[in-house]
Image (tube, helix red, strand yellow):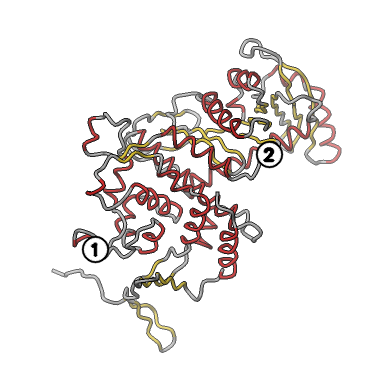
């Protein structure tokens, strides 16, 4: 019987007369040396340390080797560096750079208590998994084994606090974007339902962003209206913002899924403006029939897309409690008429129809890019745990990793060619850097790859971070 064993060397096609031989004998080498830039970002923002304070640790400190802060940091940096699974950490725990990021004083793990753990400074998957098994309160029966308790209300406040602290002063106006998206599920997770629009089993998380800042990431089952819970989240977020910025003007923006009388009534009662998409119907199309004809005539004359805008007051027959301003876009394209409507509390004297639609309402498209960034590149859709509470924590992890990457972009990449780069590009060009690591008594030497192509950019980002004022 033929035995299969691991070869001691790797043989590749030769180059001319030279053989090409590879071996895994390079010593302590990391592929994530750029993660040190994330650590510099954390030192100036305190995002991860603030997140770690949102957990109550009831373990006996004399019996643990990994503090909550170290576990949280290892998990967040892992996501930012592209490692979505807990299983990845069984190998990553050997990486001294990840240990440095997690603030391990013994980055080589040479002082671990058990011989089998020596050389592995970080926590393995089983230890990290305890964070996700956090009980809801300290009186829970499972507290005997799961002694780290997540405090969701504190985490929710942290997301808004980071946004507030990132500004030197109160802006004149802010826009809060609300949106829901699908998070497909492939198991029997708690809260799993089939969604007719998305045509799969999924969660329906609610996001609220202000520019690039995530203020809310709430995991929800999908057997609900897309707008459910929006009023409660807005009440919490707006209240927290106004405690610090009492005079700031706030506009809430969303698509037609959030055009609900309860949300608009709440905004009107709390001096918050709104602009929401309004689903078209026959009554609305009849109101702009003349404008649709004008747009068609303009299109036929120039063979170019044509738009005509109209302002009017409108009230539904039974779902709205009052008349509201509606802006209509009567558009004609190659495929025919394309009418669109938005409803708003902003007066005609404040913003005319075309600017309100094209500049204010259409600006919400950038939020969709932020959601995609978090779901595709920071694994917000990695909700495969059995319990919804554990999956909510995974969504929090992803959101905090996004906040850290966003802070790196805002503070470190300003003034560079990558100032608007998405997380995957930042990871590829800045974080995935090979380096040799040597640990001595007084220093940790990180010898970055000499062939790294973005050396000048790396220097510039580090200079920017070192010049940034800590929060």
Up the image or down, 31 lies above or below 421; here it is below
Image coordinates for residue 297, horizontal then vertical, percent: 84, 32
Query: Could you tell me which residue is drawn at 39 percent across and 79 percent down?
Result: 13
For disc 2, the marked residue is: 171
Number of callouts in the render?
2
Image coordinates for residue 426, horizontal then vertical, percent: 54, 57
The N terminus: image quadrant: bottom left
Up the image or down, 430 lies above or below 391; here it is below
Measure the C-alpha gap from mark 1 to mark 2. Answer: 51 Å
Which image quarter: residue 458?
bottom right
Query: Could you tell me which residue is drawn at 42 percent across and 65 percent down?
Result: 31
Q: Secondary structure at mark 2?
A: loop
Image coordinates for residue 386, horizontal then vertical, percent: 31, 36
Name the one closer to the observer, 431 or 18.
431
Query: Could you tell me which residue is drawn at 84 percent across and 29 percent down?
Result: 294
Ranked by sequence position, the earlier of labels 1 and 2 is 1
Q: Secondary structure at mark 1?
A: loop
């Amino acid at each position: 019987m033929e035995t299969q064993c691991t070869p001691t060397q790797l043989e590749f096609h030769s180059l001319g007369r030279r053989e090409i031989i590879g071996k895994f004998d390079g010593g302590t080498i990391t592929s994530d040396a750029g993660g040190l830039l994330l650590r510099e970002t954390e030192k100036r923002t305190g995002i991860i340390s603030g997140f770690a304070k949102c957990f109550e640790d009831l373990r006996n400190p004399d019996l643990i080797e990994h503090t909550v802060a170290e576990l949280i940091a290892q998990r967040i940096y892992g996501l930012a560096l592209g490692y979505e699974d807990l299983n990845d950490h069984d190998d990553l725990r050997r990486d001294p750079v990840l240990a440095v990021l997690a603030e391990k004083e013994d980055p080589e793990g040479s002082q671990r208590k058990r011989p089998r753990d020596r050389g592995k400074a970080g926590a393995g998957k089983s230890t990290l998994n305890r964070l996700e098994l956090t009980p809801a309160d300290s009186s829970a029966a499972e507290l005997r084994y799961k002694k780290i308790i997540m405090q969701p209300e504190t985490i929710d406040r942290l997301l808004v606090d980071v946004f507030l602290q990132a500004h030197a002063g109160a802006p004149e106006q802010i826009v809060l974007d609300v949106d829901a998206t699908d998070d497909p599920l492939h198991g029997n997770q708690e809260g799993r339902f089939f969604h007719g629009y998305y045509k799969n089993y999924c969660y329906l998380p609610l996001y609220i962003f202000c520019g690039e800042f995530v203020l809310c990431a709430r995991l929800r089952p999908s057997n609900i209206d897309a707008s459910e819970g929006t009023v409660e989240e807005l009440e919490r977020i707006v209240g927290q913002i106004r405690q610090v910025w009492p005079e700031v003007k706030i506009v809430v923006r969303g698509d037609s899924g959030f055009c609900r009388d309860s949300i608009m009534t709440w905004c009107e009662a709390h001096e918050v403006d709104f602009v929401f998409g309004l689903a078209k119907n026959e009554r609305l199309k009849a109101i702009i029939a003349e404008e649709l004809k004008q747009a068609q005539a303009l299109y036929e004359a120039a063979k170019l897309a044509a738009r005509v805008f109209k302002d009017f007051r409108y009230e539904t027959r039974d779902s709205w409690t009052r008349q509201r301003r509606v802006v209509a876009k009567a558009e004609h394209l190659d495929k025919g008429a394309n009418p669109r409507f938005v409803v708003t509390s902003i007066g005609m004297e404040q913003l005319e129809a075309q600017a309100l639609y094209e500049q204010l309402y259409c600006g919400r498209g950038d939020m969709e890019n932020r959601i995609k960034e978090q779901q595709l590149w920071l694994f917000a859709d990695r909700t495969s745990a059995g319990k919804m509470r554990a999956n909510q924590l995974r969504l929090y992890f992803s959101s905090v990793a996004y906040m850290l990457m966003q802070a790196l972009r805002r503070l470190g990449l300003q003034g560079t060619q990558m100032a608007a780069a998405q997380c995957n590009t930042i990871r590829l060009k800045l974080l995935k850097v090979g380096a040799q690591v040597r640990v001595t008594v007084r220093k940790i030497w990180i010898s970055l790859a000499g062939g790294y192509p973005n050396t000048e950019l790396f220097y510039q980002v580090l200079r920017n971070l070192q010049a940034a004022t800590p929060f």
